[in-house]
Image (cartoon, rainbow, N blue to C red):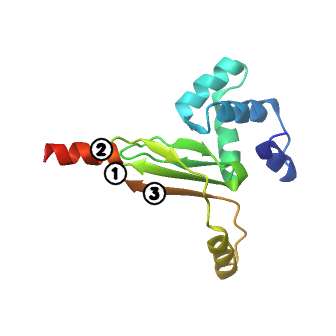
Amino acid sequence: MSNALQRLRDAGYKLTGARTTVLRVLEDSGGHVTSAELLERVSTADANIGRASVFRALDLFTRLAIVRPTYGEGSAAPIYVLLPGGHHHHIVCTVCHRVIEFDDCRLGELNRELEARYQMQMTGHLLEFYGVCAACARNVAQEA
């Protein structure tokens, strides 16, 4: 059973066919998918799962910190990102919009400090850094 399915079960939720299908599609999509892409892929996987079921699953997964919506520059539609292990990290080029994922999470101490300071039990985080990649920086320098 995947970590996300176990988190659903541990939180007292049933592992319905719709929820497991939506989660499997998210996982098969590499953990980065828009709601439109997710709807299309879920429909392909199981035509009996309706739009409302997909959005209810996304809402539940968001409340349980299994996924988080993130927004690209200038995008009004969120991209849903899986949070395996409760966290996910990106570096985003603001010129070409290339996304680099990294796993080197050194936020344990900050997480504990925030839990103590705000008396919250953290369930996850999505960390994004923004900058200009080397290729785009070279192109900008050549144009100058």
Mark 2 is on which residue type?
Answer: Cys
Q: Position of residue 27 (x, y in %)?
A: 68, 35
Task: Evaluate whether residue 64 shows in this view.
Answer: no
Can you say whether 38 is above or below 122 in the image?
above
Q: Quadrant of residue 74?
A: top left
Q: CA distance from mark 1 to mark 3?
A: 10 Å
As measured in the structure, the alpha-carbon distance from the residue carrying label 1 to the one carrying label 2 is 6 Å
Q: Secondary structure at mark 1?
A: loop
Q: The N terminus is located in which quarter?
A: top right
Q: Nearer the viewer, residue 49 or 27?
A: 27
> Looking at the picture, which amino acid does disc 1 mark?
Val
Q: Is residue 118 visible?
A: yes
Residue located 63% across and 75% down the image:
114
Residue furthest out toward the bottom: 117
Which image quarter: residue 25?
A: top right
Residue 61 to residue 34: above or below: below
Query: Which labelled disc corresponds to residue 27?
Result: none
Asked if the residues shown at circle 1 and circle 2 are in contact, with their CB atoms under 8 angstroms apart, the answer is: yes
- Callout 3: helix, strand or loop? strand
Crowd rating for badge 2 (residues with CA inside 10 Å; few <14, some 14–19, many 20+): some
Q: Which residue is mark 3?
A: 129
The x and y percentages for residue 70 are 51, 48
Mark earlier in primary sequence (3, 2): 3
Marks 3 & 2, CB-CB < 8 Å contact: no
Q: Which residue is mark 2?
A: 136
State if disc 3 and disc 1 touch (CB < 8 Å): no
User: At x 65% / y 18%, what residue is drawn?
Assistant: 44
What's the amino acid at mark 3? Phe
List the residue tagged with mark 1. Answer: 132
